[in-house]
Amino acid sequence: MGEQKKPVGPDLANDGIPAEDVGTETPAAAQVDGKAVIVVRTDDGVRVVGGRCTHYGAPLEDGFCERGKLHCPWHHAVFDLATGAAIGAPALNPVPAYQVSERDGRIYATGPVDTSTREQSPPTKPASVVIVGSGAAGAAAAETLRRLGYTNRIVLIGEEPPIDRPNLSKDYLAGTAPEEWMPLRSAGFYNEQGIELITGQRVTRIDRNSKTVHLEDGSWHDYGALLLAPGAEPRVLGIPGADQGHVHYLRTLEESRSIISALEHTSSAVVIGAGFIGLEVAASLRQRDIPVTVVAPESIPLAALLGDELGGFVRDLHQDHGVVFHLGRTVTGIQGDQVSLDDGTLVAADMVVIGVGVTPRTELAVQAGLTVDDGIVVDDRLRTSDPDIWAAGDVARYLIDEAETVRVEHWVLAQRQGQTAAHNMLGHDIVFNDPPFFWSQHYDVPINVTGHSQDWDEAIVRGDPYQHDVLVAYRRNGRIRSVASIYRDLDSLRAERALATDDQGALDDLVAAPD
């Protein structure tokens, strides 16, 4: 979570700002009654909204505006400049909107004002909606349905209440985010919204003929529209000793709590896997002064996704913080307080955390006879082979062009897919074409990645990761498909915008810009 800046800029309530100083893309920082705001000119006039993102508090004057939308610089949340509504994940809550006036060539603002609206008549209205999965996609879909004016029954079924899952391996595990930050919503939110939240009950089958979802306690729920968003589960490592009590996986809040609880008696930890989750776990444990060893088969962490230069920087960053790597190695067994490697090395470990990828939860879809191919296959509206069933999140295999489908395991993308699925359940007919976006935190260094980062054949590096100032573009067959960056937030936002429209000219210009 970022440190909050104090409000800066002119006081719009009393002093105003010269109208000619208000730009159209770059928001200006200001304040109203001591609260941070931004001011920007749109096609519909000057807008003033709150200046702090409701996700993690990013200063929105560092973002940019286009077509009546405000884009957050840190994690790419999107807000409606007319109403302040959060219309793009990961933000859930609106920013306040202010009443704007112009006098003698100066812009003033008062408020905030109530701009809340709810669409009362969706194009279609299923008799009920059941959502299987209370993670990013499922929770976002449930909230979006209500925001769009859907008033019929919503049932949200999951293993735990919706939580801020990215923080399980980041601030919460590191001890810098308290427990109360973890729920996405307060205990009473779902009751207030008329969303029936069912946790601790496993869905056992879907009956497409009767349009019912059946739970393990024998209960069942009718659906007019069904969203499958069960997510993925950690890939289990089949080695001797992996079933011992000091061996952990990390997906749920309870699993993160279990790791934290065990740290009191931990003097050495081994992390198996050098992907983003494994390395974030390593960073979090080092922030708690736990000695950490990372074991992984690759020679450079994250090189397949980020390239050798950025991957090598991440390795060196962790080594600078005391992480010991055994790269090019695999774990062959876990014995008591040590692990054995394939070269005979023994590494001390009274805690082991395994992070070697995940597997999509497709069992329900297979049982129901839906089309499945390493994920539940959906069209560009996120609809499955059954017209009354949608899928979103880690489990969805979706179209990115006429010939290519992908399945992506990112939090923000899952939220946005849940939002799009909710729109389409209500007949809005929206194509899902958002480029994936995610961020990864390594000590004080955030890495932002936008676009489809698999299967690239050329990495173009601009800047220096060791100076914490770099942008890397990844090409496949001459076309830029994804961009990674460190502390180049505006470039990351511009890359996301260009990738969404496949504007290769804008992407080439971004890469060609001087460092």
Image (cartoon, rainbow, N blue to C red):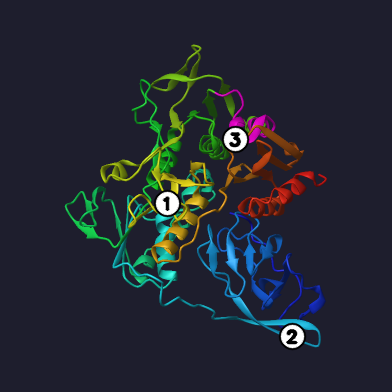
Q: Is residue 300 magenta?
A: yes
**Residue 205, position as x, y percentages in the image:** 23, 48
Q: CA distance from mark 3 to mark 1?
A: 23 Å
Q: Which residue is mark 2?
A: 102
Residue 136 at least partly seen:
yes
Q: Disc 3 residue type?
A: Leu
Mark 3 Cα shell of 10 Å, populated few (<14), some (14-19), many (≥20) = some
Q: Main secondary structure of the magenta part?
A: helix
Q: Secondary structure at mark 1?
A: loop
Q: Earlier in the sequence, mark 1 or mark 2?
A: 2
Q: Nearer the viewer, residue 357 or 1?
A: 357
Q: Which residue is mark 3?
A: 305
Q: CA distance from mark 1 to mark 2?
A: 45 Å
Residue depicted at x 73% and y 37%: 460
Residue 311 at least partly seen:
no
Q: Nearer the viewer, residue 482 or 427?
A: 427
**Residue 485, position as x, y percentages in the image:** 68, 44
Point out the frontmost of discs 1 and 2: 1
Any mark on residue 392, and which? 1
Q: Secondary structure at mark 2?
A: strand
Q: Nearer the viewer, residue 13 or 204?
A: 204
**Residue 390, position as x, y percentages in the image:** 37, 54
Q: Disc 1 residue type?
A: Ala
Question: Relative to residue 354, is residue 85 drawn left or right?
Answer: right
Q: Earlier in the sequence, mark 2 or mark 3?
A: 2
Extent of the magenta region: 298-315
Q: Is residue 109 above or below residue 446?
A: below
Q: Disc 2 residue type?
A: Glu
